[in-house]
Image: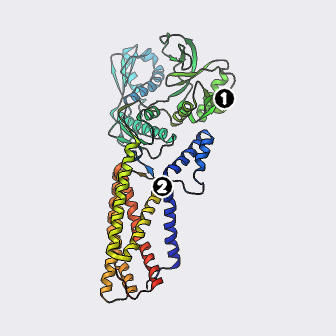
Amino acid sequence: MLQIDLWKRVLIVLTCLAGLFLAMPNAFYGQVERHNDALAEIEALGSTPERAAAVAEWPEWLPSSLVNLGLDLRGGAHLLAEVQVEDVYATRMDALWPEVRDALRDERGTVGTIRRQPSPPDELHVRISDPAGLGRALEVVRGLAQPVVSLTGVGSTDIDVAGDGDIIIVTLSAAEREATDDRTIQQSLEIIRRRVDEVGTREPTIQRQGADRILIQVPGIGSAGELKELIGTTAKLTFNPVVGRASDANAPTTGRTVVYPSIDEEGVFYILEQTPVVSGEDLTDAQPTFDQNGRPAVNFRFNPSGARRFGDYTAQNIGSPFAIVLDEEVISAPVIQDHIPGGSGIITGNFSIEESTNLAVLLRAGALPAELTFLEERTIGPELGQDSIDAGRIACIVAFVAVLVFMALSYGLFGIFANIALIINVGLIFGLLSLIGATLTLPGIAGIVLTIGMAVDANVLVFERIREELKTAKGPARAIELGYEKALSAILDANITTFITAVILFAVGSGPVRGFSITLGLGIITSVFTAIFVTRLLIIMWFERRRPRTVEV
């Protein structure tokens, strides 16, 4: 019997209304985008009359999720960076030296005195005064080796140890180099992603390319230079004891001290202990704030381990200067006035509000493990993106109108029902894209155009089956019912295979391919829904109202 239960009718109508409701903000894209940006700025920096006015432009009770525009539509910055993984090798050697020194000290009677020698960045050279003890020294240093932490490093150790006369040569093993490279790239990816996400950009593309390169594409950012400034800064923060001041960068130092310039005081250099008390790795939070004089500053907080070391040092060194060092420059060197428990403090300097906000972002994201070299950089202007949007809009309109005219001419009233379902279908696609926060790119627009063309396939199958049933002299109600029943399996088979293809494209593809697969996959889901349920509901409601003795399809 040609009917749909009341609860099913209500569910179909509510689903359509919900999808169109979610898609509605995209019709007011600029207004809603200003509203969302103002909310983000209020959360980060506080309210101003301009931000409050932007928030008021869009009612709070309406949805505000938008379909994010990709780099090719919105404009933005494109960077290809190479990670200098060799930098990490030198850091590993520096960190290994204290362990080697302490281990050999217990064997001083056999190996004699121990001195670190100049060496390549990825090697550690240690001289012993008694060459006869070289064998024992090599045995002790090899005892420091650890298993390689990687899937391919099973059975391997992290260091190789060799001897040459009275010199111990320590290098990273091949398995450890490979594992270190992989960890460095992954850590760089995560830190870049956190830095970009902190400034509120939507849907950036940050992915690994090859062995040591990272592709970064950020829609909506002003220029490639602005993006480089955000992610290319190492932001290595340390807190070092101050040994003295100097007026020359070439001031004499020992092996345990370094000379860094002051950011605020021109011509002033600080002699600092090389080993920091705490570093940025111990930070758990950093937020822009204002100091007691109303100047921009950054408030920070350490983890329990860093808080304990920071508190112990300040308690033991009241009255001594303490340098805050960022990327080998002294931001400030305040005198410790009192014990600072709790592991929190404030960084002051000649900051602007923007500089304090960016510094807080960099400190929260952490320091890059290695330097980035930018091999390729492009700024894509919004004008190019607008041209792409206009071209895509024209393509969608042409395809849409052509399909509407074809269906109306081919199937009459039933074709008009299919056209209504097609309009709802496009609205549902944008509603789902807004709901999941997907990014729309040029290939994504191509997927929507393809969906518009494919959306009526299911209705064509149903209407042709109805025509065949009407030729067998069945009544209109029975013909419509059988048309939907017999076409269902063909509709599902055709769309399931296409959906599987979309899933595979999403799983193995990247960038533009994924954008195409997302709109194609969502379009298949909404097309099947509108063809099987929405057009059927429209036809049944019309049939119940008119009760025609014959129908023409």
Say if residue 430 shows up in the picture.
Answer: yes
Residue 318 in which image quadrant: top right
Using the image, tell me which numbered label, if any, was put on residue 138: none
> In the rendered structure, which amino acid carries the disc numbered 1?
Gly
Q: Position of residue 11 (x, y in %)?
A: 51, 72
- Residue at 43% x, 78% y is 539
Q: Secondary structure at mark 1?
A: loop
The chosen color scheme is: rainbow
Q: Earlier in the sequence, mark 1 or mark 2?
A: 2
Residue 279 in which image quadrant: top right
Vertical placement of 1 versus 446: above or below? below
- Please name which of the two marks, 1 or 2, marks the residue nearer to the observer: 2
Q: Quadrant of the C terminus?
A: bottom left
Residue 114 in which image quadrant: top left
Vertical placement of 440 versus 327: above or below? below
Q: Quadrant of the N terminus?
A: bottom left
> In the rendered structure, which amino acid carries the disc numbered 2?
Asn
Q: Position of residue 107 (x, y in %)?
A: 45, 20
Say whether residue 459 is left or right of residue 265. Answer: left
Mark 1 residue crowding within 10 angstroms, few (<14) / some (14–19) / many (20+) = few
Q: Which residue is mark 1?
A: 294
Residue closer to the observer: 303 or 365:
365
Residue closer to the observer: 349 or 64:
64
Q: Which residue is mark 2?
A: 26
Say whether residue 32 is left or right of residue 442. Answer: right
Say whether residue 14 is left or right of residue 169. Answer: right
